[in-house]
Structure formats: structure tokens, C-alpha cells
Amino acid sequence: PLSSQRFDMTDRLQSYFAGRWRDASGPEYTTEYPHDGSTVARLHAATAADVDEAVQAAERARLQPAWARLKHHERAGLLYRIANGIRERSEELAQLQRLDNGKPIKECRALVASAAGTFQFFGAAAETWEDTITPSRGDYLSMSVHEPLGVVGAITPWNSPIASEAQKLAPALAAGCAMVFKPAEITPRMALELARIAEQAGVPAGIISVLPGKGSIVGDALVKHPLIKRIAFTGGTTVGVGIQRLAAEKLMPTSLELGGKSPTIVMPDADLDHAVAGVLYGIFSSSGESCIAGSRAFVHESVYGEFKARLLEGVKKLRVGDPSSEDTQMGPLVNLGHRASVEKYVQLGRDEGGTVLCGGERPTGGFYDGGSYYLPTVFEGLPNNARMCQEEIFGPVLALLPWKDEDDLIAQCNDNMFGLASGIWTRDFKSAWRIGRALQTGTVWINTYKVFSISTPFTGVKMSGYGQEKGRLGILEYTSQKSFYWGLNEAPMPWATS
């Protein structure tokens, strides 16, 4: 592997829009490495005028024969080349993402591999895409085809940039769309690197644009632009609701992957070795900065004491440290402002009567003092209707809640505005099926947690959003349907000739 020190530098980044690498027209700003606060990139923020230029160029580019007339297998070839380009630069990309958001290097490598797999999967889906001849109900041949929506927009978050961006760009390209990206302001690098790899793979100029900047400027301009035909958004629920409100004025489809407050359930017959490891991973991997983090653990009262003791012992062993270290399990939070937000929720939990069993503070000494680190935190003694158990914290904070009655358990799990994911730990497949069907979430994990497949659809319910990402049919999210009828009648239509 390449030495991580090779990438510990300040880079001057340019945006990529309308087929050119150049500075955007807004003010210059910097991004910081969460480990120590050092500057890792300087770039100019985009403006509404830059968005308009990018979208106009994308509309022209998508109509050119070099893109519009590509056959499915030819678009697939482009996606395969992007996948290979990611793999060829995998270690470099992982190290760069580490600098962008402070994730441990092992997790960054997994995200880069996931992004490559996403392009490969949607390349295969494009290559094998079939439209449908529908059953005829008259003297005609009927068929349904799908066509690209046009220019689409993507607004992506800071917590897992390269994977999130690949999950939007790959199906859009497979469908024949052009895409304008607004990556998170503080983590712009991965979207720019994907654009560079796509350019080198042969994607025509103008088909992809990347415009970092403020959501209130770049995001708003993107959503409101009359030539943008769809928005794919991953982020907070409040912003998602605002996007949907703007989209409604254009009757524009969206996909919204929003917040979560995911419950994990430990049944009385659960294998506690698996359950403890899974709950630890579900909330504390990625430092809890994950929309599907298992932040509410409902543990049956018969095993609550033993589970709690094992869990706390496991928390003590977690390695919170430098994200460049191969041994680190938890890195810093993304920045000092976000850490302050997590700290406010921890104080809120105390004010609401909760007891902090471990964590609840910053680690101190050495490199900890220069970064945005926070210790894994476990609460107990809070009711499910406490704010800390209802609102998304997006940090390494777990609430333990004992349960006794299954009907009440399901009611408590569902008594939340979010519905993104859930987990069940049990040896009884009938219980898993019964409870899993009753939970109001888009994903249910049974005896595992936070594992994904690009081939399996991902969506949310309630205020966790809607619209499909992943899965073979994810391409259809970027298409419009058109029906054809081919008349087979030998005689003219009788209505006009009688």
C-alpha cells in the first residue's frame, strides 16, 4: 500500500463543470482534516451562475450523438472503465477520503471498493437492460420503453462521499442521463475524483459536472433550475423536506435518503456474542455518523443485565484514534461544529434523567486535543419518548432500553418519525419474520447489521424519505416511461369508415 504520508498535503482543487477544470466563481474556502484541524484543500465555492452554466452545458452534451446514440452495451463499457479506474487508484482514493472526513483508513478502503462495485453492477444492469412487449388486448402490438430523464442533479453528504456519489452517478449514466453534482461543502474531493476518472474513461465533456459550495446557494439553484428533471439527495430530513417542497413546484421526481433513529432488538434467545458485536458495530462504526446507525437498543429484560455488562466491556476495548492507523476503529467526528452538536445531545440526555454508563466526553491528551474526537457513549434510564431517543444525533451515542412485552416493543420501535433501518437478534426465524414485518423501516437486518449489497434496493419510509437507490431497477429512477402501440389491423378503423 502507498504510504499515507504521501497525501498529507494541502491541495489546490478546481471544480469541473461544462467540460472544463477551473475555479468556480464564488469565494475561496478551505477544508480541514478532522484529525488535527489542518487545511487539506483550498477551492472556490460555486455560485448560481456556475450551476446555470453547468446545467445548460449538460443539456447540450446529452443531446449530442456521442452520448444520446450510445447503445446500452456501449454505456456499460464506460461504466466498466470507471470501475477499473477506481480500482487502479484505490489506495490513493482511500487516503484522500480519509483526509476529507476523517474516517478510519480501513473503512475508506471499503467505501472505495464499494464505489467500484457500484459502477460494475450498473454497467452489467445497463448491458442486460430489456424493455417490455406488453400483452396485447386488441389488434395491435404494444410495448413499453424507458428513456433518460435528461439532466439530473445529485446532492450528497459528507459522511460516505465516494459510495454515496457512486450510487447516484452510476445508474444515471447507465440510463443515459447527464448529472450535475453538489457534493457536501466540507468533503468535495471524492466527487471531483470520480469526475476525473469518468473523464479519463471517455465520458463526453459536459455530461458530468461537480460544483462544491453551500447548499443554500448551489443546492437551491440546482433544484430550482428548469432543465433539472430529477434530484437525488442524501442528507438531513429538514433539508430533504425543503427540496421536496421546491421539487413539487416543478412536478419533479426526487429520491430522498434522509435521517434515521434505527432500533435494534435483542430477543431473550439471542446469541449475545453476536448481538453485542453487532450493536457495537451498528452504532459506533463510522463514529455513529451514519443514517442507519442503530442508536436505540431494545434489550429484553431477561438478558438486559448480561447484555449491558458485555456491551460496556466491548466499548472499553474500542480503539479511538488516528484515522491513518490500521488499528483504528473510531476516528474523529467530521468537525468541531458537529462535535458540539453531539455534546448538546449528550447534555440533553443527562437533563432528561438519563445515566451515562460510559463515554459522554472528549478524549484528552496528545493528538486528541487537536481533533474533533468524542468517546463512544452509552445511556440508560431514558424513556423512548425522550428527545435523545427520538431525534437523530448522528454521532456515537447509544440508548439502552429494556423491554418485556412484544406488542409494546413493536409500538415503541415504530413510535418515531423515522423509518430507515432496524435490526433483530434472535435464534427464532419465526420471531424474526413476525417482528421484521411489523417494523416500519425500509431495511431489516436479522442477526447482522449495517451490511449492504448494491443488488438489493435501499429506501426509507416515513420521514426517512422515499425513492429507490441500488438494485437492478435503480436505473428506472432516472428514466421516464413511454408506451408504443403498433396497429396490426388490415382494415381501416371502423369508426371512421362506417
Image: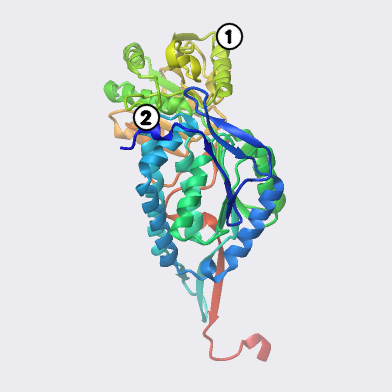
Q: Quadrant of residue 240?
A: top right
Please state the horizontal and vertical placement of residue 286, each as a whole percent of the image. Answer: 43, 28
Please state the horizontal and vertical placement of residue 321, each as a whole percent of the image. Answer: 39, 20
Q: Which mark is residue 424?
A: 2
Q: Secondary structure at mark 2?
A: strand
- Assign the C terminus to one quadrant of the image: bottom right
Task: Please report the residue visible at 58 percent of the width from the left and 13 percent of the height from the top.
Answer: 348
240 lies above or below 77: above
Please state the horizontal and vertical placement of residue 417, each as a whole percent of the image. Answer: 57, 30
Crowd tier of the residue under label 1, counting other residues whose Cα lies within 10 Å: few below 14, some 14–19, many 20 or above: few
Nearer to the camera, 170 or 486: 170
Which residue corresponds to mark 1?
A: 351
- Frontmost of labels 1 and 2 is 1
Nearer to the camera, 269 or 23: 23
Nearer to the camera, 280 or 460: 280
Crowd tier of the residue under label 2, counting other residues whose Cα lies within 10 Å: few below 14, some 14–19, many 20 or above: many
Q: Are marks 1 and 2 in contact (CB under 8 Å)?
A: no
Identify which amino acid the numbered label 1 is placed on.
Asp
